[in-house]
Image (spheres, rainbow, N blue to C red):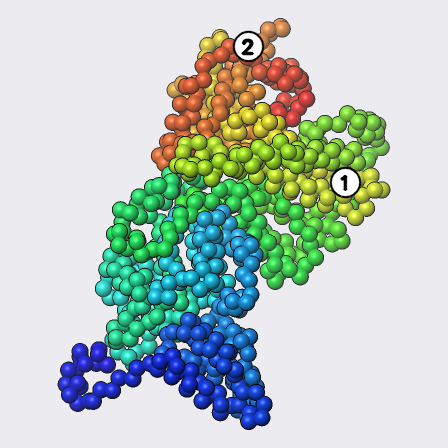
Amino acid sequence: YERLVQFKPRVRTALETHRVHPLGDQETLNLAQQWAARYSSSEGPGLISQPILHEAFQLAQQYLGDKAAPGNLLQFLALTQTRLSGGNASATVQISLDDLLVTLSQLTGLPINILDDRQELDLKALREYFQQRVLGQPEAIDCLVERVAMIKAGLTDPTRPQGVFLFAGPTGTGKTEIAKTLAGFLFGSPDRMIRLDMSEFQTAESLRRILGEYDELLSSTALVDQIRKQPFSVVLLDEFEKANPGIWDLFLQVFDDGRLTDRRGNTADFRHCIVIMTSNLGAMIPRGTSIGFAKEEAGFTPGSVEKAIEQTFRKEFINRIDRLVIFHPLSRGVMREILHKELNAVLRRRGLRNRTWAVEWDDSAIEFLLAKGFTADLGARPLKRAIERYLLSPLAMTIVNHQVPEGDQFLFVRSDGQRIEVEFVDPDAPKEEVHEAMRPIAEASQAAERRLRLEEIVLDARGTPGEVELLRQCYDRLVALMESESWQQKKQATLSQTSSPGFWSSPERFTVLGLVEYMDRIEEGLRAAGSLLGRLAGSSPTDRKHFSPRLLQPLAHQIYLLEAACAGLAKDRPRDAFLLVEAGRGSGVPPSLNNKFAMQLGQMYRRWAAKRRMELEVLQEMGGDGMGPYRLLMAVSGFAAFSILEREAGLHIFEIPKGGKSFQHCKVRVRVVAQPDEPAGEDPQALLAQALHALAQVSDAKLTIVRRYREEPSPLVRDAVRRWRTGRLDRVLGGDFDLIF
């Protein structure tokens, strides 16, 4: 009416105004009693007792305040009576408190255990509900669990929204997902979340999407109209800082009074909403993922986020926010949990859930999807696309071609570092016939099973029971180690540091987080190995004489890396490494030969990294073209990367016969230093600068001859550090130098 008078002042003299005010409390109750008497039997009990009527009045006042009395109470009672009678006005029913709560739950979407004061709220179960859906953000989960508890207890301010929160942090860390989760729990469906992309609200014209149209005849999906339609909602204001500052001021009215007046003068009631703003202020992270563990924290500190928010928003705005929650970048352990969650969801799709296949994930496939599905600047957002592209596409090809497992066959998913490979493995596959000429060799191999080594299975798995038994023994030792008190104490002591004051802004956080994530990854790798080991036995493990070598080899490889990682961890050795290969000078050998040998060693380390599923980044490659000696500098990370490579540091010599018993000696120097735990920085050349600095800090000790290589007159490699010699030059240069014994 007031808006109408503003536009047409003469209406004030043409009409006589009568304002209808809400009834008082007692008048409302009296009217409700009169209404109830119409549906009450003259002989039996009434439609509703006096105590239950008073309870209905209190519930209507608390939850249906968007309508005035007595309409809110009468509508509440009428809906309950209609539901109980099935629409039959002559049916005799009696309304109980439970009946009222069911109706109220249907109207608001709130679960009955929130509405009913007689029921307890299981906070532990509520916390688990959030933790299953949003990973790695304990502060945000605590915030929302506490708010739900306040709503349950009726302790929220009745004049304001149920909660006003600002979630700040990098993209893809779960801010939107946790808002959907809250809407699903409180109001029954994630669809009860109203999302506004605030980057679209930068002009005066965009106000109509919040305040609606002037013309009542025009349909509108503005925020005020959506709230009138469903006042019990979660309102998500995404990237709030990108909106026009005038929009910020508009929402001050919502945060203060829980109300917003539209362009027609009508009021929308926000007091039953929870308002969540999100922001990326101060949380920008360099593009791409950094090599190694726990480097996702690069460029991010909670202090920088808080400072950016204080510099952007006025104090009166910040003071109206109930709580600022900072979302941290996803650690590698959290990424792994999210990936497993998404993979489980994939296996529940229609094309897979009705198939009886078992699926085994090799750690190489998990690491490949982690690399493709997560980035520091986008968080987990690329993950679904990576799963579709790299996993579901090759899987669909095998299904369409009817290449499906039968019997005890199972789906084995692994990666070669470039793509995902999907194959069906039969653990009960018959043993290949041994040719008669090869039988003595096979018998000799069986006799030597007592002297088996893990490295031998990695190199040449034959599928014998002795190999399986050795793998089981190695696996059991690793399980015992990770269940030991020393392992658990080390992990808990490290985790406890994350809750110390100032931890998230201290330089030591990179070392601590890196160690925790490394231990988590070792434990996850062992779980995958245990699952594959159990699958390996097939349906009849006791009387089997042969096992699948295709399955034994990756399992042995996984256990080999886990053992090396645990050994390095026990000695507090660094995890990741910088590796420098430099061609020698002088020694009477043409520079081209030194350069050629240095390039061969560079390829050897590249092949080794690919086979051991290491992350390798070439930081510098120069020379070898007549303009100077060849030089290759790489960053390597993965299980026991430094522990394995540190024994490569020293001189590598290639011997070329030059007549008689003399040789020319091509020399290459290999240097290995630890990667610091601190991130290198945002500059594209930062990791190179860090590597050069790390190399400069290590003094030149007396050079040790690591290996001598010879191709003629017959291939021969002699390793002075690991103390072995072999004629398999091809295997050494193929990247298996750490497996030969």
The image quarter in which residue 470 lies: top right
Mark 1, residue position: 547
From what the image shows, is residue 207 above or below residue 532?
Answer: below
Q: How far across and how far down the image is residue 91, in percent? A: 57, 90
For image coordinates 43% across by 71% down, the residue present is 63
Residue 664 is labelled as 2
For image coordinates 43% across by 56% down, the residue present is 176
Distance from disc 2 to disc 1, alpha carbons, whole Å, reads 47 Å
* Amino acid type, callout 1: Phe
* Amino acid type, callout 2: Gln
Q: How far across and how far down the image is residue 704, in percent? A: 55, 12
Q: Quadrant of the N terminus?
A: bottom left
| Disc 2: CA contacts within 10 A as few (<14), some (14-19) or many (>=20) | some
Residue 460 in view in this figure? no
Residue 715 in view in this figure? yes
Looking at the rendered structure, the secondary structure element under dot 2 is strand
Q: Is residue 726 rendered to the left or right of residue 685?
A: right
| Disc 1: CA contacts within 10 A as few (<14), some (14-19) or many (>=20) | many
Looking at the rendered structure, the secondary structure element under dot 1 is loop
Q: How far across and how far down the image is residue 331, in percent? A: 49, 42
Residue 80 is labelled as none
Q: Is residue 476 rendered to the left or right of residue 666?
A: right
From what the image shows, is residue 300 above or below residue 599?
Answer: below
Q: How many marks?
A: 2
The image quarter in which residue 526 lies: top right
Which of the pair 148/653 is nearer the observer? 148
Task: Report the mark closest to the observer, 2 or 1.
Answer: 1
Q: How far across and how far down the image is residue 280, in percent? A: 35, 49
Q: Is residue 274 rendered to the left or right of residue 445?
A: left
Upstream in the sequence, badge 2 or badge 1? 1
From what the image shows, is residue 155 above or below residue 324?
Answer: below
For image coordinates 52% across by 82% down, the residue present is 49
